[in-house]
């Protein structure tokens, strides 16, 4: 490998960009579409069966196979596939008994769907700071607990595992339900244990932007039989109408939303999920190569990764010393041929940062009559404003994000390293 060495001279004033080839941005998931996906989908068409519970042979539906695959991968008792990650979160919250009057702690940095799921369950989201890992700061959870706190949703953002040991300890001490949002971290782990298996439930998404896709889709996983049965009911239309794996536990029926996954989506998800380890292995090699090549630069502070071995590794994030530096660093890096995002060019924050969750900040429910903050059952007094998480905002103002993908070669990694080093050197000479 022809890696740029730190002691090698580099002309930082050289106007020739380090890289001129495109850094082809790809969806990690659909980029892989190939013969396996085609066969899997054709198989569904040939069976003329798109409803997973259509008899006979329900046990061999594509949806069932997809659930089995994850039961084995994650070593959990129950997996329930659904039509989206949002549906999985809503079902987990409802199944866990979260509802009007309850507060649910969520991080300031997550996709807005996490907050929406809490509100759809008619509970109130409480927004807390993230730390240098850009995942929930455990200390912020402790500080946000009130008599009304029922649950906490750690979100493994951008494939980075949360500090699950500390979070579980706090949750146990205060009797809180933990529901992990694993939408962005399928394939990740913390201390060797798969993400999604720490809390009472874990919720995955198979939307196209995620590591693997089923078109649209999601999944709730749990070791709790009752939770599984309640989620099965809620994800169907009032009963677990068509049957579940847990026939022998008596849970009363209640209205459901019909969040079922179709066989078409399941077949796609199945073909995709079979290559998850291969995909993650490749991404980890790419990220490690780049990180090793820039680790010594004093200008950059790399994102803290609570467990680097468990990082899904499709994004590289580092912080600069201040907002101005981040902005100019980002612009120069782009001129060197490495696309990157910051809070300023909308590459990173957008709907993933609480300041842009307008209806939450304004406490707007589904209607005036149906507003969790105004429920007579809600005795708390949560407040929001755009400045409420200064630490999170400071991190984002200084952060630069580079999307990685499975097709990056060693040469591409070398380009990224040389470009980052060149821009860092230019900044060093400026000051
Ligand atoms: C994508 C995403 C969701 C929602 O998943 P959908 O399948 O799009 O409904 C929830 N949380 C996070 C962190 C996400 O990135």
Image (cartoon, rainbow, N blue to C red):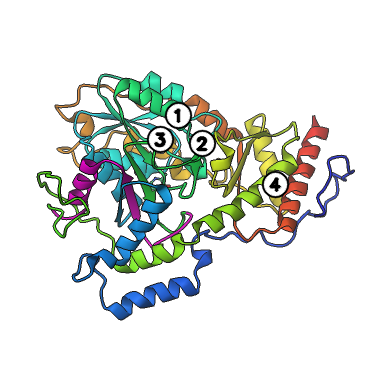
Whichever of labels 2 and 4 marks the residue nearer the N terminus, that label is 2
Front position among marks 4 and 1: 1
3D distance between C-alphas at marks 2 and 4: 23 Å
3D distance between C-alphas at marks 3 and 2: 16 Å
* Residue 290 tag number: 4
Give the residue pinned by disc 3: 154
Secondary structure at numbered mark 3:
loop
Between 352 and 72, the residue placed more toward the observer is: 72
Left or right, 351 with reference to 99: right
Q: Is residue 155 visible?
A: yes
Give the residue pinned by disc 1: 165
Secondary structure at numbered mark 1:
helix
Front position among marks 3 and 2: 2
Q: Which stretch is magenta? A: 211-238
Whichever of labels 2 and 1 marks the residue nearer the N terminus, that label is 1
3D distance between C-alphas at marks 2 and 1: 9 Å
Give the residue pinned by disc 2: 191
* Residue 423 tag number: none
3D distance between C-alphas at marks 3 and 1: 12 Å
- Answer yes or no: do the residues labelled 2 and 1 have beta carbons within 8 Å? yes
Label 2 crowding class (10 Å Cα cut-off): few <14, some 14-19, many 20+?
Answer: some
- Answer yes or no: do the residues labelled 4 and 1 have beta carbons within 8 Å? no
Secondary structure at numbered mark 2:
loop
């Amino acid at each position: 490998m022809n890696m740029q060495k730190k002691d090698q001279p580099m002309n930082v004033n050289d106007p020739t960009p380090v890289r001129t080839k495109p850094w082809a941005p790809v969806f990690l998931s659909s980029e892989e579409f190939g013969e396996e996906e085609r066969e899997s989908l054709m198989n569904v068409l040939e069976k003329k069966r798109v409803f997973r519970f259509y008899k006979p042979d329900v046990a061999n539906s594509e949806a069932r196979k997809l659930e089995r695959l994850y039961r084995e991968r994650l070593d959990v008792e129950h997996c329930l596939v659904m039509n989206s990650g949002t549906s999985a979160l809503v079902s987990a919250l409802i199944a866990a008994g979260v509802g009007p009057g309850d507060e649910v702690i969520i991080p300031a940095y997550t996709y807005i769907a996490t907050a929406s799921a809490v509100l759809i369950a008619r509970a109130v989201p409480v927004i807390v700071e993230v730390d240098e890992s850009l995942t929930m700061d455990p200390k912020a959870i402790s500080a946000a607990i009130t008599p009304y706190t029922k649950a906490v949703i750690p979100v493994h953002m951008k494939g980075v595992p949360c500090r699950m040991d500390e979070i579980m300890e706090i949750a146990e001490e205060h009797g809180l339900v933990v529901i992990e949002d694993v939408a962005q971290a399928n394939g990740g782990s913390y201390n060797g244990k798969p993400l999604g298996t720490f809390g009472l439930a874990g919720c995955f998404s198979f939307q196209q932007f995620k590591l693997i896709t089923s078109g649209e889709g999601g999944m709730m996983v749990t070791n709790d039989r009752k939770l599984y049965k309640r989620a099965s009911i809620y994800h169907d239309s009032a009963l677990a109408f068509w049957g579940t794996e847990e026939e022998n536990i008596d849970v009363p029926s209640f209205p459901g939303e019909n969040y079922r996954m179709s066989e078409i989506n399941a077949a796609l998800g199945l073909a995709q999920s079979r290559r998850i380890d291969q995909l993650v292995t490749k991404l980890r090699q790419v990220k490690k190569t780049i990180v090793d090549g820039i680790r010594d630069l004093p200008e950059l502070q790399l994102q803290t990764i609570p467990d680097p071995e468990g990082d899904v590794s499709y994004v590289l994030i580092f912080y600069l010393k201040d907002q101005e530096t981040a902005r100019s660093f980002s612009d120069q890096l782009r001129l060197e041929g490495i696309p990157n995002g910051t809070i300023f060019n909308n590459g990173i924050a957008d709907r993933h940062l609480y300041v842009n969750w307008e209806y939450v900040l304004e406490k707007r429910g589904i209607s005036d009559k149906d507003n969790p903050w105004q429920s007579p059952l809600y005795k708390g007094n949560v407040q929001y404003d755009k400045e409420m998480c200064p630490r999170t905002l400071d991190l984002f103002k200084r952060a630069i994000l580079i999307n990685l993908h499975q097709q990056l070669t060693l040469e591409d990694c070398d380009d990224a390293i040389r470009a980052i080093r060149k821009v860092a050197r230019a900044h060093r000479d400026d000051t």
